Image (cartoon, rainbow, N blue to C red):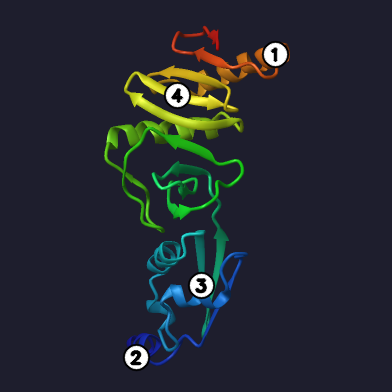
Amino acid sequence: IAVGTVLSLTVFFRTEIVEASGSGIYSQQEITDASGIEIGDNLFLLDTQEIEQRITRLLPYISSVKVKKVLPKTVQLNVNDAAAAYYIDNEDGTYILLDTEFKVLENASSEIPASSVKISSMTVSSAEPGEIIEYEDSDAADRITQMAQAVSSAGMTQATEIYTQGVNSNYIVYMDRITFELGQCTDLENKIIRGLASCEQLDSESPNIRGNLNLTVDKQSYFTAK
């Protein structure tokens, strides 16, 4: 058994084929190069987690990787592409693009992808492609994350902007027209659902209406038109 184990780790099961599939953005060669897998590497000694992290870091537009070892000599890399879910304005007129996990896809894009949500009023300290965005104010970053998660959980597809101006001042903008005043980041999902119900009624009466919707009072909504 000991001899067989040693041979498996030193002589047999050497990588000869690395295959990649699933991306419409990167070529197979780009993915296999980013994996760091070398021909001759032992399949049993390959660190799948390290391979996954390396690919998603070096190729920002890949969101996830599944590494499959097919004995005796093949490694298969199945990837999923990432899409921009959020963006941040740069001072030079370009944009930082982020995926749903706030990983930086690009830090100087010339265009805003459709359906992406603006994150404003935040000072960025680091925006390295392939890495999670970093802000100067970590507490504000936590509030942004909470609101983003609540938007997703509530199924709000009409959000166009998220921002925070303090512990008690957190906001989501509906279709660039109606600002949800959320107060503290508590019970966010219910506040959003309540806000969406109010917007449905407001839109039925006036489709282009603009204003602020105060959702800070439990079970009550107060709209102020602009």
| Residue 69 visible from this viewpoint | no
Q: Residue at x 40, y 23 (%)?
A: 170
Amino acid bearing label 1: Ser
In primary-sequence order, the first of circles 3 and 2 is 2
Mark 3, Cα crowd under 10 Å, few <14 / some 14-19 / many 20+, is many
Q: CA distance from mark 2 to mark 1?
A: 79 Å
Question: Disc 1 designates what residue?
Answer: 206
Image-quadrant location for residue 225: top right
Neighbour tally class for label 4: few under 14, some 14-19, many 20 plus, Cα within 10 Å: many
Quarter occupied by the C terminus: top right
Residue beneath the point at 37% across and 67% down: 50
Query: Is label 2 in a helix, a strand or a loop?
Result: helix
Asked whether, in this view, residue 101 is left or right of residue 127, the answer is right
Q: CA distance from mark 4 to mark 1?
A: 22 Å
The quadrant where residue 122 appears: top left
Q: Position of residue 25 (x, y in %)?
A: 59, 65
Of callouts 4 and 1, the N-terminal one = 4
Of mark 3 and mark 1, the one earlier in the sequence is 3
Q: Is residue 160 above or below residue 55?
A: above
The earlier-in-sequence mark between 2 and 1 is 2
Name the residue beneath numbered marker 2. Answer: 3
Residue at the disc numbered 3:
31
Dot 4 lies on which element?
A: strand
Q: Amino acid at mark 3?
A: Ile
Q: Nearer the viewer, mark 3 or mark 4?
A: 4
Instruction: Tell me if residue 82 comes above or below residue 24 in the rendering.
Output: above
Distance from disc 3 to disc 4, alpha carbons, whole Å, reads 39 Å
* Residue at numbered disc 4: 171
Residue 119 in the image, given as x and y percentages of width and height? 44, 36
Q: Position of residue 54 (x, y in %)?
A: 40, 67
- Of badges 2 and 1, the one in the foreground is 1
Q: Going by the image, does 34 lie left or right of 22? A: left
